[in-house]
Image: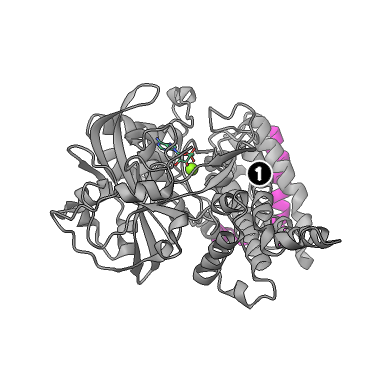
Amino acid sequence: MPDTPQSFASQSSRATASVPLSIPFSTSPGFAAIGEKFFTRLPPTPLPAPYLVSVAPAAAALLGWDAGIGNEQGFVETFVGNQVPEWADPIATVYSGHQFGVWAGQLGDGRAIRLAQAETGTGPWEIQVKGAGLTPYSRMADGRAVLRSSIREYLCSEAMAALGVPTTRALSIVGSDAPVRRETIETSAVVTRLSPTFIRFGHFEHFAAHDDVAALRQLADFVIDNFMPACREDAQPYQALLREVSLRTADLIAHWQAVGFCHGVMNTDNMSILGLTIDYGPFGFLDAFDANHICNHSDTQGRYAYSQQPQVAFWNLHCLAQALLPLWLPPEESDKEGAREAAVEAARAALDPFRDRYAAAFFRHYRAKLGLRPPAGGDDKADEPLLTALFQLLHAQRVDYTLFWRKLCGISSTDASRDAPVRDLFLDRAAFDTWVADYRARLRAEQSHDAARELEMLAVNPKYVLRNHLAETAIRRAREKDFSEVDRLLAVLSRPFDEQPEAEHYAALPPDWASGLEVSCSS
Ligand code: AMP
Ligand code: MG
């Protein structure tokens, strides 16, 4: 049995800040106000000789800081967890979840500690240090995160934000040479993450599994009151909550597919109730397009393959629905004739909009990527043949996904002799010619203006994404204590749609050595 929240709470002691860091925000209790059964109060565990690896200017700005904040006294000590400022109220929350389709029981913030909730001009932000030591929810693990995975999470959080994909954010990485055992001995790091809330589907599953309907209701009310107030107006607020989460999740996954992002571990404990990308582990962006690409080396069955992400999200939403069910089917009524059927039907009705919303978002993204206007009559299905043929072609030819879209921006609707930059990505040029003839016909049918369309397409087809080998290069240099590549990559990825002539090589095909890279759950 894991320690109970209470037993840890009594051990927690509050260190006071030796070098206070002045903050440009106020704080509020946030999640800490909802009651002790949801979390444990405890301070982070210090790490020896911490050093700053990187600060993300855009994330710092969300809190009201400028990019130089990392050099301020107290920053490193605070965001490695070595001092607990008086404005902090550190907590680790409890959740459960389904991992790889199987109920895993209690999980929780095993190495993440929420320091505080900042109230800022950009909204509320929970500030959380990940890798900050053991909690009651660490199970058999060590409470730490390695520099390697921390760099990946940090860079990708900020890259996704710049791509416009809903995501948790990353403020900083602080490192320490304290050794951490994974497949090899690595060094430690703490990523400071920001999110309006870190509540996951798994938080609801946890209290449902304990038949604690009161806690379930408290959680649901917290999410509704703080983030989805419109649900309160609904005759059935909790069903409205489920519908809202379904819609947000549909939007999120369609966006992932469009940018070629594979999450890698879509367990229900890694699904944000706000529809944000959360818990960056063995994620990957598609290089050569493979519809069934599996980015997580530990995912031997391909449960979380690129093509599976929409279905898996829907499956995860069913787990959430199951957890929420007692909110509209009180246990004392569940035996009444027809009550259960009616409640399940209500859940289904709340989940159902996922399909249409996903399809609509999918077509919207891909039409934008193709520079097409909605078909006459607004029938998305009319775009399906062109897209299906394209995916089959990209898959058969293993064309680089990001390069394809970026180069397609420059296509002419009238002049095939200018196809070379994109055509040369295909081994089977004739197959490309067949597809592009249809595409060109469509462009001409809607009297598409080449120059205007190119600009619009360049604004939705990124030139720069966090390919595995780019992260790997930054990690290798960081291990040598050269953090400049982390900063450089962060800067490039924060403007993914802009031409950055000095950064051309970051947009190139992966080098040969990248094919040997394996990313697993080890972090
Ligand atoms: P993840 O696969 O990273 O989503 O983690 C699944 C669960 O394991 C979560 O509850 C994490 O907090 C926990 N966990 C993962 N790695 C560690 C670690 N090194 N120490 C403590 N808990 C961990
Ligand atoms: Mg997780």
Is residue 1 shown left or right of residue 330? Answer: left
- Residue 450 in view (yes/no): yes
Whole-percent x, y for residue 479 in the image: 27, 30
From the Cβ of disc 1, is ligand 1 less than 8 Å away? no
Query: How are the colours assigned in the image?
Result: one colour
Q: Residues within 10 Å of mark 1 (few under 14, many from 20)?
A: many
The image shows residue 147, relative to residue 278, as above or below, that is above
Compare residues 159 and 142 and report the one nearer the observer: 142
Indicate the amino acid at tag 1: Val
Q: Can you give x and y, in whole percent of width and height, for residue 109 in the image? A: 43, 46
Residue 334: x and y, percent? 77, 59
Q: Which residue is mark 1?
A: 312
Numbered range of the magenta stretch? 430-453
- Could you tell me what secondary structure mostly forms the magenta stretch? helix
Corner quadrant of residue 139? top left
| Horizontal arrangement in the rendering, residue 359 relative to residue 219 (left or right) | right
| 446 in the magenta segment | yes
Q: Quadrant of the C terminus?
A: top left
Expressed as whole percent of the image width and height from the top left, the position of residue 370 reads: 63, 53
Dot 1 lies on which element? helix
Residue 266 located within the stretch drawn in magenta:
no
Establish if 306 lies above or below 223: above
| 242 up-or-down from 41: above or below | below
Residue 502 appears anywhere in the view = no
Look at 44% across and 30% down and name the residue there.
522
Nearer to us in this view, 99 or 518: 99
